[in-house]
Amino acid sequence: MGLIMLKRLLKDKEIVKFYIVAMIIGILMSWIISVWMIPDEDNHLELIEKAIQNPLFMDNIEKSLGMDRARVEWDESQAIDGKQFLSALVKKPDYSVKEMLPGGFSLSVLKYLPCVLGMELGILLHLPTLWVLQLGELFSLIVYVVICGQALKVCPFKKGMMAIFMLAPMMMQGAGSFSHDAIVVPLIFWIISYVFYLRYEKETIELRDVVKLMAAWIVVTYVKVPYTFIILLGLMLPLKKFHVRLGKGEINEAVIRKFRWPVLVAILIVAGVGIYMFRDNVWIQVIYGVIVEFPRTLYLLAKTAQNFGGHLIVSSVGNFGWLNAPVSPVFGVVFYVVLLGIAVLGTDGSKKQMTKWDRTVIWGTFITLTLMILFSMVNHTITTILFGSESSAFEYNIREALYQIPFIGGLQGRYFMPFVSLFFMQFGCMEKMSRKTTKIVITVFGVITYLYVGYVLINRFWIA
């Protein structure tokens, strides 16, 4: 079974090229950006510790690693200590295998399953702690690359454009880390590609298609709630394609049209009851507040764009480590200008054109997801500014608090990158460049991007 799956993964030569390029980039980035240098990496390790119910896990890792964590993490003028790094490569761990095994599992382990498996493998082999961490990152990277490759395989058009986003520097930093982005980001790319595949290529939508999409969506929603509304892309799917067999029956266009209004009413009732029952939930309170105080919300959005617009562009293209290794703002702007040029002028050989309805759904999904990301940081901003910490237990009135914050803070451009591809995918090609020229432009663009990114990373972490 494993060999059959491997053959399927390696069948398409173009996808194999993607696997090779993505793995090389991911591995290089995970080594150049040393441990503890990726934002919230320590927080994710603490969450892993809780997920595997081993209260000594994080402390044992940190003590056994033998690298001065604060030296680089809090001082951007400092580079990684070469002697410490070389020593960590061969230093035997201070802990025993038994001390590091899981004491149990909580459901949240699903968010970190690849890196947990990688680290536990390294622990069982009693490898140096640095290699244990690198194995965790490698397993995360493999999952990211495989899911993205499968997304590219089914994507019916603009594969090159989608590949650019999958290989974007900030996405690759998260792919080879302990962050749950290694799972949720490729699944978003897969959902986008699979919806396009069902809309433009597959003749019928069957039960397995629905199950695949729903399973991916449930995982995305569980891992990162703001991305829930990626499901809106399903509105692109034509009803006439549905032939979902359930036993002897079938859900098709006629059945959907017959029961869609009763089902919609039932969903709204269930949603209303759920919102009422969980009305004290932070998410529900924030959404309630930003809707009721709509004028203030618009003001905060405008101020956020005014104060952080440039930061969002830079941090979506590349602001590495603890946000202290940024690419040039000029490069950030050029990055998107080139992307737009490829999207509008390039050719991928596909003659498929999006309908007005499809574009409407894409714009609606894009705007909704953007707002959800923005609103997800409202609670962070309120608790940080008013109470000094996001973990504060103080309660507040959301409507009053919205008038006590000057903008929505804590945003990073990488939060938007997984679905920004929608903006570029919906442009119709003017076909001013041939398919071959388009590939060359994408390749040269990628090489230049990573030569520059490599310079930024090496200069920050190894030269300083």
Image (spheres, rainbow, N blue to C red):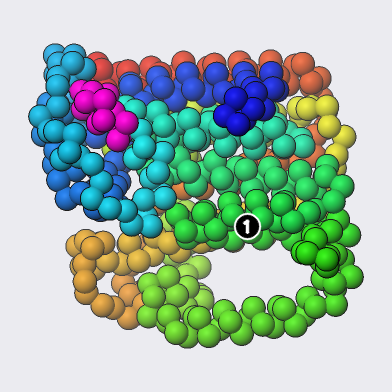
- Asked if residue 125 is among those painted magenta in the image, a careful observer would answer yes
Q: In this view, does 49 lie to the left or right of 449?
A: left
Does 265 appear above or below 165? below
Q: Residue at x 60, y 25 (%)?
A: 3
Magenta range: 119-132
The quarter in which the C terminus is drawn is top left
Q: Is residue 337 left or right of residue 305?
A: right
Which residue corresponds to mark 1?
A: 214
In the image, residue 67 lies at what x, y percent? 14, 26
Which of the 4 quarters of the picture holds residue 296? bottom left
Q: Residue at x 72, y 78 (%)?
A: 263
Callout 1: helix, strand or loop? helix
Residue 388 vs residue 303, the one in the foreground: 388
Residue 128 vs residue 271, the one in the foreground: 128
Report whether residue 382 is seen.
yes
In the image, residue 269 lies at what x, y percent? 61, 85
Does 454 appear above or below 387? above
Residue 180 vs residue 436, the one in the foreground: 180
Report whether residue 319 is seen.
no
Residue 130 vs residue 307, the one in the foreground: 130
- Asked if residue 124 is among those painted magenta in the image, a careful observer would answer yes
Mark 1 surroundings: few (<14), some (14-19) or many (≥20) residues within 10 A: some
Question: How many marks do you count on the picture?
Answer: 1
Q: Residue at x 72, y 51 (%)?
A: 209
The quarter in which the N terminus is drawn is top right
In the image, residue 60 lies at what x, y percent? 14, 38
Q: Which residue is drawn at 36% across and 22% down?
A: 456
In the image, residue 417 lies at what x, y percent? 53, 43
Q: In this view, does 367 lie to the left or right of 281?
A: right
Does 96 appear above or below 401? above
**SS majority, magenta:** helix
* Residue type of the residue flagged with mark 1: Met
